[in-house]
Amino acid sequence: MAEAVPILVITGQTASGKERLAVEVAARVGGEILSADSMKVYRGMDIGTAKPSPEQRRAVPHHVMDVADPAETFSTARWLELAAAAIYDVHARGRTPIVSGGTPLYLKALLEGLFEGPSADASIRAGLREEARERGTPALHARLSEIDPAAARRIHPNDLRRIVR
């Protein structure tokens, strides 16, 4: 983010009451809520995501929610782009941006920035997924262990998405 804008951050574990607290704080300070939840970005995924009710959304504006289709890839970089725009917009209107959610990578990106290297190469990822189909995900995990043992220790051998990433 180019210019520092004061924000409030409410974070915590799943089902810890973040949304309820964010709505209460927003009502008290004249704030608007920006979701930092990796599942609330998807349209139609209302069950199991603890999205605010339509009444809550009318009472307190919510941003960065229902912005992607479940079938599309949604990156942290895209979330950060939307969140930064919303933060500046909310602040410019004299309101307090309240970032609420439990996706640590989103919060880390917002507070510390993102990796500045090249973006993901779709063809490499497709090749790795094909290799997993042919040889199995554990075989791909074994290959990761040779290249990056620390990452392999953190990632379950059957977690194809994270192995490929």
Image (tube, rainbow, N blue to C red):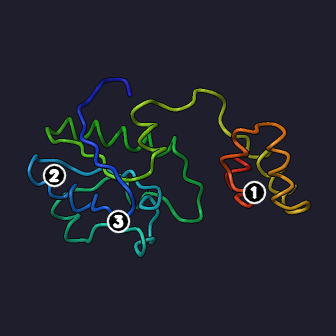
Q: Is residue 68 above or below residue 88?
A: below
- CB atoms at circles 1 and 2 under 8 Å apart? no
Per the rendering, the mark at residue 46 is: none
Secondary structure under tag 1 reads loop
Q: Is residue 45 above or below residue 88?
A: below
Counting from the top left corner in percent of width and height, residue 71 is at: 59, 65
Q: Viewed as shown, does residue 77 lie left or right of 48?
A: right
> Which residue is rendered at x = 26% and y = 51% of the image?
33
| Residue beneath disc 1 | 157
Secondary structure under tag 2 reads helix
Q: Viewed as shown, does residue 124 lie left or right of 104?
A: right
| Residue beneath disc 3 | 15
Looking at the image, which residue sits at the far left? Answer: 28
**Disc 3 crowd, CA 10 A, few/some/many (<14, 14-19, 20+):** few
| Residue beneath disc 2 | 26
Which mark is nearer the camera, 1 or 2?
1
**Disc 2 crowd, CA 10 A, few/some/many (<14, 14-19, 20+):** many
Counting from the top left corner in percent of width and height, residue 90 is at: 23, 42
